[in-house]
Amino acid sequence: MDMSRILFPAILGALLFASCLSNTGKQILTPPETAGTGETQKYFIVTDHKNKLYGEPIPEWVNLYLEGGASHVETLDAYGESYVFIGRNEGNNFNALTQWTKGFSPELDFPRLAAARIETRFRAAVPYPDEEYGAFFEELIRTASDTVWTGAVREDDFWIRKTYFPGGASEPVFFENEERETWEFLILVTIDRKLFASQLATVFRNTKPNPAPAKDQIAAANRVKDRFFTGF
């Protein structure tokens, strides 16, 4: 997918950024956070991106992430031996998002990324995780968040500016009080697969829920643990 094709010129006047007008077409995208969830999807076009002023395209890893999330980025040869995690922040304050990017630390922020992806994996396996895993589920996420993970590497960062419009519309159409434009900042973080797996095993061992889950809840959690990386 050629993400460099856009619908509108982008001028960030207050920030002293500028972009050139392109008439090569438009991109209609669905954020990976909503894709396949059954929720109302918000379509958008990319109207600016980092270093566009200098003629640089959107990196392939960003294209793949926008198409299908971190798992799509892992299909790149460069990350064949790594798991990919994406730090993401979105809003309408470019300066604040820039400061967030500068302050992002793999050592401090990776536990949150790891915990979120672990949570997603367990949620995907059952319809009601809090009931079907019992206290194990909440304690697992807490343990993953509190764990000191090692080996995470910040590889790259990027930002895009998006203009949203309702799904199915051929052109952007807006309603009163609807968020029209936003910046999305992305940080690419990788970790060696074997190293991540060994640390995850420690997280599982250190997860000690109270009260103890029932037998069927333990069995449900063990089924996910035994094939955790299938679909991870």
Image (cartoon, rainbow, N blue to C red):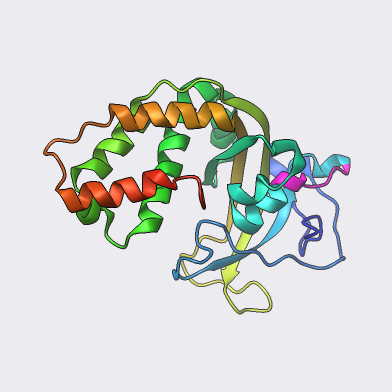
The residue shown at (51%, 72%) is 175
| Viewer-nearest residue: 57 or 153 | 153
Magenta-drawn stretch contains 58: yes
What are the residue bounds of the magenta stretch? 55-61
Residue visible at 68% across and 75% down in the picture: 171
In this picture, residue 95 sits left or right of residue 140: right
Q: Is residue 199 above or below residue 26?
A: above
Judged left or right of residue 26, residue 224 is left
Task: Indicate whether residue 101 is drawn in magenta.
Answer: no
127 and 5: which is toward the camera: 127
Residue drawn at (45%, 26%), measured in percent from left and top? 199
Residue 220's x, y, as percent?
A: 28, 52
User: Which image quadrant: the N terminus?
Assistant: bottom right
Q: Is residue 191 left or right of residue 57?
A: left
The percent coordinates of residue 71 (x first, y second) are 60, 49
**Residue 83, percent across and down?**
59, 37
Q: Is residue 183 visible?
A: no
Q: Is residue 56 above or below residue 176?
A: above
Name the main secondary structure of what is drawn in magenta: loop
Res 97 → quadrant: top right
Give the image location of residue 26, x and y in percent: 77, 67
Image vertical order of residue 189 relative to residue 231, above or below: above
Quadrant in the picture for residue 163? bottom right
Which sits in the foreground, 118 or 46?
A: 118
User: Quick check: can you spot residue 196?
Assistant: yes
59 displayed left or right of 189: right
